[in-house]
Image (cartoon, rainbow, N blue to C red):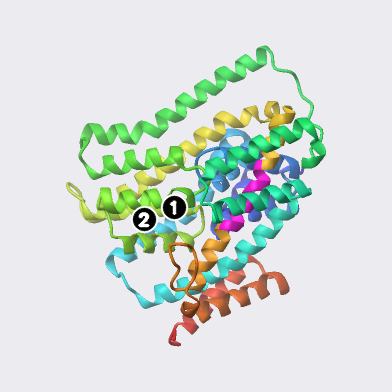
Amino acid sequence: MQAQSLAELTRVFARIGCLSFGGPAGQIALMQRELVEDRGWIEQGAFLRALNLCHLLPGPEAQQLATWIGWRLHGVRGGLIAGLLFVLPGAAVMLGLSLLYVVAAGLHWFAALFLGIKAAVLAIVLQALMRIAKRALGTRFKIVLAIMAGAALALLHAPFPLVIVAAGLAGGLAAGWKPALLDLHAAPSGTEPGESGRRLAAATIVTAAVWLFIWALPLAGILLTLGPHHVLWQIGLFFSRLAIVTFGGAYAVLAYMAQAAVSRFDWLSPGEMADGLGLAETTPGPLIMVTQFVGFIAAWRNPAPFTPLVAGLLGAGLTIWVTFAPCFLWIFACAPWMERLERMARLQGALAAITAAVVGVIANLALWFALHVLFRQVSETGLPDLASLDWRAAVIAAQAVLLLFGLKHGIAATMAFCSAAGLVLSVIPFS
């Protein structure tokens, strides 16, 4: 593993944070290329095992993986730098777009720009899916697990946690019966748990307590100053609960979040919820950043005793805080146990099987995204109306595939080209 300075870590993750388009598949693939393949800062096996751990935790797995990498390289300081830089560029872009949205909703160039970006994301996700599948599906058993996971989600509408638990159980059984099915390697050597294990447990408890305090601090301030009926308290409490149940990424909780934000709290309309998702899909960082848009709009429209601008900024900031503070809690509390967990053969098998299943999950999400980008109308059963095909999106997506796979252009250049293409093609009528 190559040495690197804290300043170099900061520069690299600032770049990753600005280029982390394409959802978790694209973001994980970007970190794989930048940190494992190009720089050799993290070994491939450690990268995949950490990814397995992140898939088991609530919250955006890509952001947690970035935090773990920073922690692995430079401790808590590195984890904070990597985790924050993964989020802040997207948060800044989303805040700017949210401001534009409330003051100039319906701008034509917005839709045109997003047409190109979303079409380019299809190619980026495809590239990421192929890269991750190549590394995670090394045996026929893993391939079968990936196919079954994707089919269970797409055809049976199985809950994501159930798919993950089933894959983990299958992997644990396979590891004890025939490890070759999962291509398991020898676990890294290390000292056995003893008194050091007790010290580690005590440190973990302290870490969890500190981050629980950090997580709850703004909520306590709001409760004491504004009371339990203020919109900021509702925002903080709702998104804190959401952070605990966000297994499987943002898509797993989007339906629940939309229903609550629209029907229960009446913060925004169904159409505005869809607009927020579109903004999140076209900005860097985790897709769960759509929560920031919802928090901004909710506070903007219920500003007292602040101005709408101040209330919107507070709502957006509070949402980001309670969404991502738990991610640092999970990683800093669980990461020190990684080496001990790696020495458990059945757990290794379970995590390897979960990684394979997640490939199917990502494939299912990529299919969902493609249908909603390429077609204007998709039925509740998931079937598209073929007559609603947006030929402009299809053309841009095909050119993005050519740029990434054929001409080997980078993500930034591909996104820039496709954004420009969206603006140009938007002057041509859809039908």
Q: How many marks?
A: 2
Q: In whole angstroms, how far apart are the C-alphas of marks 1 and 2? A: 7 Å
Task: Write down the region rendered in magenta.
Answer: 354-364
Query: What kind of element bears circle 2?
Result: helix
Is 241 one of the magenta-colored residues? no
x%, y% of residue 199?
61, 16
**Vertical comparison of 99 with 2: above or below:** below
Q: In the rendered image, which quarter is residue 129 located in?
A: bottom right
What amino acid is found at the position of numbered circle 2 in the picture? Phe
Residue 190 shown left or right of residue 325 in the figure: right
Residue 20 visible, this orientation: no
Residue 385 shown left or right of residue 130 in the figure: left
Please give the name of the residue rendered at 37% of the width and 32% of the height, measured from the top-left corner: 216
Please give the name of the residue rendered at 61% of the width and 14% of the height, measured from the top-left corner: 198
Q: Nearer the viewer, residue 14 or 207?
A: 207
To which residue does mark 2 refer? Answer: 293
x%, y% of residue 390?
49, 78
Q: Residues within 10 Å of mark 2 (few under 14, many from 20)?
A: many
To which residue does mark 1 refer? Answer: 289
x%, y% of residue 16?
59, 55
x%, y% of residue 195?
66, 12
Query: What kind of element bears circle 1?
Result: helix
- The image quadrant where one finds the C terminus is bottom left
From the image, give the main secondary structure of the stretch colored magenta: helix
Q: Residues within 10 Å of mark 1 (few under 14, many from 20)?
A: many
Q: Which mark is residue 100?
A: none
What amino acid is found at the position of numbered circle 1 in the picture? Met
Residue 253 visible, this orientation: yes
**Vertical comparison of 191 with 71: above or below:** above
